Image (cartoon, rainbow, N blue to C red):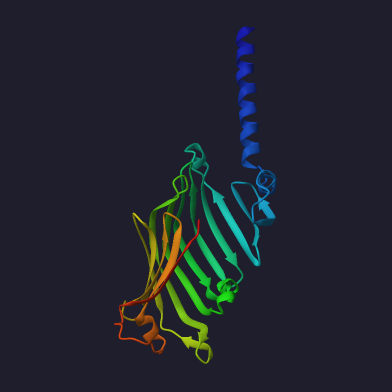
Amino acid sequence: MWSVIKASRWYVLLTVVLFFLFVLANFPAHYAWKLIKENTPNLPLNVSSLSGSVWNASGMVDYQDLSMHIDWDLNPLSLVLLSPELSVRVQSGKDADLHGVITVSQKQITISQLNGTLSVPMINPYLKSQKVSGGGSVSVFDLGLVFDHENKIFELAEGRLLWKEAKASYPGRKGIENIELPDIVGKLTNDEKGITLNVQSGKDGSALASAFLMNKGWGGVKVRKRSVDLVGQTWVGNQQPDDIIFQVREKLW
C-alpha cells in the first residue's frame, strides 16, 4: 500500500512539473508585456500586435514617430545561466532591417552579431533643429557592444559601417548646400576612455572625422579639414588636411 502511495506521489509531482513547463513554454507574449508595462509605466515605448509566446514572438514597437516590426527568439538555456539571450530582427518598411543578438546579465548589456541596413533619412527628423539632413543608406557589419550598466562604462565596441550613395544638406554661405559624397566608412573601436567611431573616406581610407562617447558620459564630434576639402568648400587658414578644425562635446549623462 505504501509503495503505491509513494509511486503515486511521484506521478503527481511529474504531472505538476510537466504542466508548469507547458504553461511556461506557451506563456503569451502580450501578457508578459502587460506585466512589464504595469511595473515600468514610464517606458517610452508602445508595443502592440504581439503574437506568439515569450520564447518566440513578433509585434510592433512605436517610439515617438518611429514604428518598427520586431521578431525575437529567446534562448531557454540562457535563462538557466541568468543571462537572457534574445535573437532579434527589427524592420521598418524599406527604411531598416537589422538583426543581432542581445544578452542581458546582472552587470552587462551585450549586443553582438548586429548586421543589416538603415536608411539615413530615418534620422533626419532628429537633425531638423540643426538644419542638417542626409540621404543614402548605412550598412552595418558585425557590430558589437558590451556596456557595463553597473559602472556605466563600455567594455567593448567593434564593427564597421558603410554609408553608400551618401548625400547631405547643410546651411552654407548662400543658403542650404546640397552635396553628394563618395562612400563613407565608419569603424567602431574602444579604449579605457570610451568608444569612438572613426569616419573615413571609402575611397582611400583617409580620416575625415570622429564621434566619441566617453565612459564618464561626455559625447562629441571632431571634424578634420579634409572633410571640408571633400565637399568642395573653402576654409580660412592654413590648416593641413589632417588638422582638426572643429570639435564639440556635451555631457549626455
Task: Give how far across and how far down residue 133 sits, in percent.
Answer: 54, 79
Task: Give how far across and how far down residue 48 sits, in percent.
Answer: 70, 56
> Which residue, as the protein is rendered here, is positioned at the far bottom?
174
Task: Give how far across and how far down residue 61 sits, in percent.
Answer: 64, 59
Q: Which residue is at a point 39% across and 84% down the rendered structure image?
A: 228
> Which residue, as the protein is rendered here, is positioned at the far front?
237
Please give left or right for residue 37 compared with residue 252 in the image: right
Quarter that holds the N terminus? top right
Q: Which residue is at a point 47% across and 38% down the rendered structure image?
A: 81
- The part of the image, by quadrant, that contains residue 248 is bottom left
Q: Which of 244 and 111 lies nearest the eye of the viewer?
A: 244
Q: Which of 183 and 50 lies nearest the eye of the viewer?
A: 183
Q: Which of 189 and 70 lies nearest the eye of the viewer?
A: 189
Give the total of numbered labels: 0
Task: Give how far across and how far down residue 96 sits, in percent.
Answer: 55, 69
> Which residue, as the protein is rendered here, is positioned at the far top?
1
Please give left or right for residue 55 compared with residue 188 in the image: right
66 in relation to 171, above or below: above
- The part of the image, by quadrant, that contains residue 239 is bottom left
Q: Which of 231 and 175 lies nearest the eye of the viewer?
A: 175
Q: Which residue is at a point 30% across and 78% down the rendered structure image?
A: 242
Please give left or right for residue 34 compared with residue 123 in the image: right
Q: Which residue is at a point 54% across and 56% down the rendered structure image?
A: 88
